[in-house]
Amino acid sequence: MQTTETETVVKPINCSHYINGKYVPSSNGKTFENVNPATEEVLGVVAEGGKEEVDQAVKSAKKALKGEWSTLPLRKRSAIVRKIGDLILERKSELATLESLDTGKPLWLSKSVDIDRAAYNFHFFADYMISVGTESYQQDDIAIHYAVRRPTGVVGLINPWNLPLLLMTWKLAPALAAGNTVVMKPSEVTPMTATVLAEICTEAGVPDGVVNMVHGFGETGAAITSHEDVDAIAFTGETITGSAIMKSAAPTLKKLSFELGGKNPNIIFGDADLDDVIETTMKSSFINQGEVCLCGSRIYVERSIYDEFLNRFVAKTKELKVGDPFDETTNVGALVSEEHYNKVLSYLDIAKEEGGTFLTGGKAADIEKGFYVEPTIITGLGKESRCVREEIFGPVVTVIPFDTEEEVMEQVNGTHYGLSASLWTSDIKRATRLSAQIEAGMVWVNTWFLRDLRTPFGGMKHSGIGREGGAHSFDFYSELTNVTVKL
Ligand SMILES: NC(=O)C1=CN([C@@H]2O[C@H](COP(=O)(O)OP(=O)(O)OC[C@H]3O[C@@H](n4cnc5c(N)ncnc54)[C@H](O)[C@@H]3O)[C@@H](O)[C@H]2O)C=CC1
Ligand SMILES: O=C(O)/C=C/C=C(\O)C(=O)O
């Protein structure tokens, strides 16, 4: 048991690897410190895995692949997958606290988004796996063709720090539902909730060896992606890391699913409902400190409403409270790490050099300890600006006016990214016309981040390869064999 919860106090945990149903340290005893980004205090230590631990985890997963998990009757496996979700909800306050300690995000957000959605990821795929089918065709009186599914195999799940439990479970739930065994690697920056999740899986009835976890840095991830007995890699994180993983996975020809960076546009036309626009743009700009791959960090506003939009958006942003993640009135918590904080601040310097005007923020928040940045709205930057083109991944947005559809669409599609977009107009014809033109895996019309887990989720261009969600996840985590029976 690695966690301690009383009625009101949840203590941070030290994080070990999880191999074959047991917490284990690194064989050389190596650890690194886990730092609370809101206070800069050390939360505990994390085992640092290397090739040896990855090898043990992969061996354990490979052995378990031949065990009962993948052949359990569907209903039994589904019940275990569901139970994981139930146990996550039972331990919600503990998991939410650990998530906020690790990431610096407000506790109310961990509770209402991260942990609830983590549980729902299991509940959703427990239901989905019962009804998922395969193709079959009758070819005249010559033959019947039907496809059967089998698990993809040993899958490496590699995740970032922004939504640690939500994103790990978004991969783990369908992987387990489809009968795979896994080696998870959480981000080195946010290791705590995945550590608890491993134990929860065992408690729910997942056999030993099916869920394994190795902590560590990029080299640990690389040991997973290059391992010859790992059959597939599901990765969420930075585009450049996706490219490195592709290279390292190439010699062993692994199946890959990538959800990568974004620089998502919000496109706001003059006929949109401005109350809705403002309320949603506040979220799409600053929720989770702007550390969501789907955040709309490039805001394009039709000139007819540009001034009114800015006045209202700036006024609302000035009301945001930055500070202690455990204060329930906090809107924006700490950025996840000193390294990331420095990266975000460096973009504020770039914005200054590029001639941008800060309408709010533009600097670190005046808080003695911790990695806090003020919500920042920048105007006056052109389409070549690095702040407009590159993923900052913090509470920083640029706002640019436009006059015509053609002009805005050129800018919208003018980056290498293609993850999501949020389009605001009351003209349904314009909405459907532009949605088809936007080079993004997901377009939200008059809304943002409205999720249905059956829908295809992922990006095009440098924002990803493949889609997750419903059938898309299931196809990635299973292999199809087509059987042809001659009549
Ligand atoms: N979904 C998204 O779009 C996200 C984008 N980011 C962006 O990425 C930047 C860096 O964030 P990180 O979490 O450090 O992203 P990252 O892509 O460096 O790391 C994500 C995961 O990949 C692992 N990793 C790193 N190098 C690896 C390699 N060569 N082989 C295998 N695994 C490797 C890391 O240890 C971590 O578990 C952020 O500043 C942000 O701009 C970060 C989080 C999510
Ligand atoms: O699956 C979701 O609803 C959210 C996904 C968010 C990311 O992938 C991200 O921020 O990296």
Image: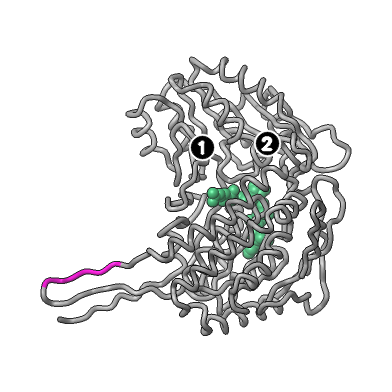
- Element under disc 2: loop
On-image quarter of the C terminus: bottom left
Q: Is residue 246 visible?
A: no
Start-end of magenta stretch: 135-140
Label 1 Cα crowd, 10 Å radius (few <14 / some 14-19 / many 20+):
many
Query: According to the image, label 1 marks what residue?
Result: 448
Name the kind of residue labelled 2 in the image. Pro
| Percent of width and height locating residue 105 | 72, 44
Q: Is residue 12 left or right of residue 487?
A: right
The residue under the point 40% across, 24% down is 426
- Element under disc 1: loop
The tag earlier along the polypeptide, 1 or 2, is 2
Disc on res. 395: 2
| Percent of width and height locating residue 284 | 58, 36
Name the kind of residue labelled 1 in the image. Trp
Asked if residue 106 lies in the magenta stretch, the reply is no
Judged by its main secondary structure, the magenta piece is strand
Q: In the image shown, does 180 or 430 lie closer to the viewer?
A: 180
On-image quarter of the N terminus: bottom right
The quarter of the displayed image where residue 326 is located: top right
Label 2 Cα crowd, 10 Å radius (few <14 / some 14-19 / many 20+):
many
Q: In the image shown, does 204 or 37 lie closer to the viewer?
A: 204
Q: Is residue 293 visible?
A: yes
